[in-house]
């Protein structure tokens, strides 16, 4: 029985995703971490997080690619884009594509936790079990 | 012959009296002479004129006096002197040349030439060079600061995440209070480091791209103006094949200039080994659907097929003193604009660098 909302973290750098995972786990979230966009997309077959913290600059699928694939598959998971290479144009793009937030790294626990709480509140998949999106 | 020459010429006899002067000299004496010695014309004693002007504190006159004396005294066959006069139209530069007159009775020829145009060209060339150097330095710094920011933001993210997690996990016990302080200090300093990087970046880079509708043809012409003296020095001739009435591109014109500059200089360097007459650079523009395209074509040795993409990787350089970042930076600038930059083999050997930029008004 999972009471704590599940948050997915996607970052190609292991120490980053581990640290972010610890931070959110210590903030009453359940956390699942992924090293690539593809791994994350594959995981959606079996379970669906309430929110995903998605790195933008990754080899292979970029954060934007992942965002597009989710949109194509009509999977409405609230997306928080994080980037180590902050550019205003990128912020606009990501938000225009439907991300709930765009954050420049490093990420402070507050306000990250509040942003996730908000995202979960407003996300259409308020049910912690995988929702049928058809 | 003397009359038809634009330079101002006067002939002195052995004792220093002007015995002949061309029309330019006489006209100058009447209309433009600003220094006392410059008013000497036919029949006047030029040495005396110089001597009294020198006594009046004119350093040009005093140098000129020595020159004329030395040439007349056959100590020197020729002397040159450059000086400038401030006029209401800015500085005017003159060159005065004193030469031995080859006649049995001796004497000297004085030629005064307005060299303002040459001086101006030299100054312009120097300014252009500085501008070029500044542009490429700015591009490299901007790019590097972006790369540094990214490389540092990642470890700062893990440090901050770990410290925040540890602080949450820390049991509220008095004996652990110090650990809590440590973690809070780590968090504070991590955030501070991130702010420093952010500030540095916005100082070094122009940060975001300032897009505005721009005329790609005009960018090409601006770059050619900027590189004119360089192209002349390298004996490279340029032919333009610009598509007229090309739709505007939505770019930061200064950044696209930087890219084009880099490509033009690269192409020139690629042709350095060619015979002078064959160093030809062609720049083309055309519209390709929603994108505008610009190509820089050289007649150099070209790029091996398997290297066409590799040359855009950082620290790959064929130049002796190259850092191998120029093309890397160019490509990242073009891609940041939503365009593409690539290299091709030229139609008659040589290399073609092509980039696209999105159209838009």
Image (cartoon, rainbow, N blue to C red):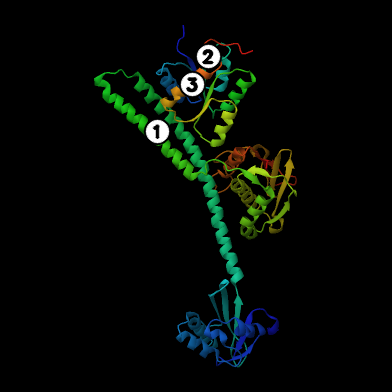
Question: Which of disc 2 and disc 3 is earlier in sequence?
Answer: 3
Give x and y (percent) for residue B128. 57, 58
Image quarter in which the C terminus of chain A is found: top right
Host chain of mark 2: A
Q: Mark 3 = which residue?
A: A118
Q: Around disc 3, counting alpha carbons within 10 Å, would you say few (fewer than 14), some (14 to 19), or many (20 or more)?
A: few
Q: Around disc 1, counting alpha carbons within 10 Å, would you say few (fewer than 14), some (14 to 19), or many (20 or more)?
A: some
| Rendered view: B77 above or below B119 | below
Q: For residue A41, say whether it is visible.
A: yes
Q: Secondary structure at mark 2?
A: loop
Host chain of mark 1: B
The answer to whether dots 1 and 2 both sit on one chain is no
| Comparing labels 3 and 1, the label whose residue is closer to the camera | 3
| Comparing labels 1 and 2, the label whose residue is closer to the camera | 2
In whole angstroms, how far apart are the C-alphas of marks 3 and 2? 11 Å
Give x and y (percent) for residue B60. 50, 80
Residue at 48%, 42% in the rendered image: B202
Residue at 41%, 25% in the rendered image: A109
Q: For residue B297, say whether it is visible.
A: no
Give x and y (percent) for residue B106. 59, 91
Give yes or no for contact between labels 3 and 2 (Cβ–Cβ under 8 Å): no
The answer to whether B22 appears left or right of A57 in the picture is: right
Give yes or no for contact between labels 1 and 2 (Cβ–Cβ under 8 Å): no
Q: Which mark is residue B235?
A: none
The answer to whether dots 3 and 1 both sit on one chain is no
Q: Secondary structure at mark 3?
A: helix
Q: Mark 1 = which residue?
A: B191
The answer to whether B177 appears left or right of B146 in the picture is: left
Q: Which mark is residue A126?
A: 2
| Rendered view: B125 above or below B195 | below
Q: Around disc 2, counting alpha carbons within 10 Å, would you say few (fewer than 14), some (14 to 19), or many (20 or more)?
A: some
């Amino acid at each position: 029985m999972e009471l704590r909302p599940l948050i997915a973290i996607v970052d190609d750098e292991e120490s980053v995703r581990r640290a972010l995972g610890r931070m959110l786990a210590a903030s009453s979230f359940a956390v699942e971490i992924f090293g690539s966009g593809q791994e994350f997309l594959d995981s959606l077959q079996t379970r669906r997080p309430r929110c995903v913290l998605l790195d933008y600059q990754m080899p292979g699928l970029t954060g934007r690619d992942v965002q597009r694939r989710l949109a194509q598959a009509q999977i409405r998971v609230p997306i928080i884009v994080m980037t180590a290479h902050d550019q205003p144009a990128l912020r606009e793009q990501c938000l225009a594509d439907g991300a709930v937030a765009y954050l420049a790294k490093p990420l402070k626990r507050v306000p990250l936790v509040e942003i996730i709480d908000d995202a979960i509140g407003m996300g259409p998949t308020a049910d912690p079990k995988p929702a049928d999106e058809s | 012959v003397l009359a038809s020459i634009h330079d101002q010429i006067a002939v002195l006899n052995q004792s220093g009296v002007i015995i002949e002067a061309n029309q330019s000299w006489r006209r100058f004496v009447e209309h433009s002479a600003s220094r006392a010695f410059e008013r000497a014309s036919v029949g006047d004693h030029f040495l005396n004129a110089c001597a009294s002007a020198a006594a009046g504190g004119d350093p040009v006159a005093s140098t000129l006096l020595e020159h004329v004396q030395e040439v007349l005294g056959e100590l020197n066959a020729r002397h040159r002197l450059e000086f400038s006069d401030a006029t209401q139209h800015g500085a005017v530069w003159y060159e005065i040349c004193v030469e031995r007159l080859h006649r049995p009775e001796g004497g000297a020829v004085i030629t005064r030439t307005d060299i303002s145009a040459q001086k101006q060209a030299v100054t312009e060339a120097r300014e252009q060079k500085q501008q070029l150097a500044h542009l490429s330095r700015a591009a490299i710094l901007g790019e590097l600061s972006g790369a540094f920011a990214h490389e540092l933001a990642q470890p700062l993210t893990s440090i901050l995440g770990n410290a925040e997690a540890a602080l949450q996990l820390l049991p509220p016990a008095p004996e652990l209070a110090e650990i809590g302080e440590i973690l809070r200090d780590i968090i504070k300093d991590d955030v501070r480091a991130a702010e420093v990087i952010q500030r540095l970046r916005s100082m070094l880079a122009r940060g975001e791209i300032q897009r505005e509708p721009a005329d790609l043809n005009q960018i090409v012409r601006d770059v050619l103006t900027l590189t004119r003296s360089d192209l002349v020095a390298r004996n490279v001739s340029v032919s333009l094949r610009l598509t007229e009435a090309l739709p505007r591109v939505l770019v930061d014109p200064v950044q696209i200039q930087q890219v084009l500059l880099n490509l033009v200089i690269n192409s020139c360097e690629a042709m350095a080994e060619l015979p002078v007459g064959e160093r030809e650079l062609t720049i083309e523009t055309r519209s390709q659907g929603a994108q505008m395209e610009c190509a820089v074509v050289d007649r150099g040795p070209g790029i091996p097929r398997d290297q066409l993409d590799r040359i855009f990787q950082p620290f790959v350089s064929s130049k002796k003193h190259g850092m191998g970042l120029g093309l890397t930076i160019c490509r990242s600038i073009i891609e940041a604009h939503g365009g593409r930059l690539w290299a091709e083999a030229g139609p008659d050997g040589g290399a073609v660098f092509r980039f696209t930029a999105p159209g838009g008004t």
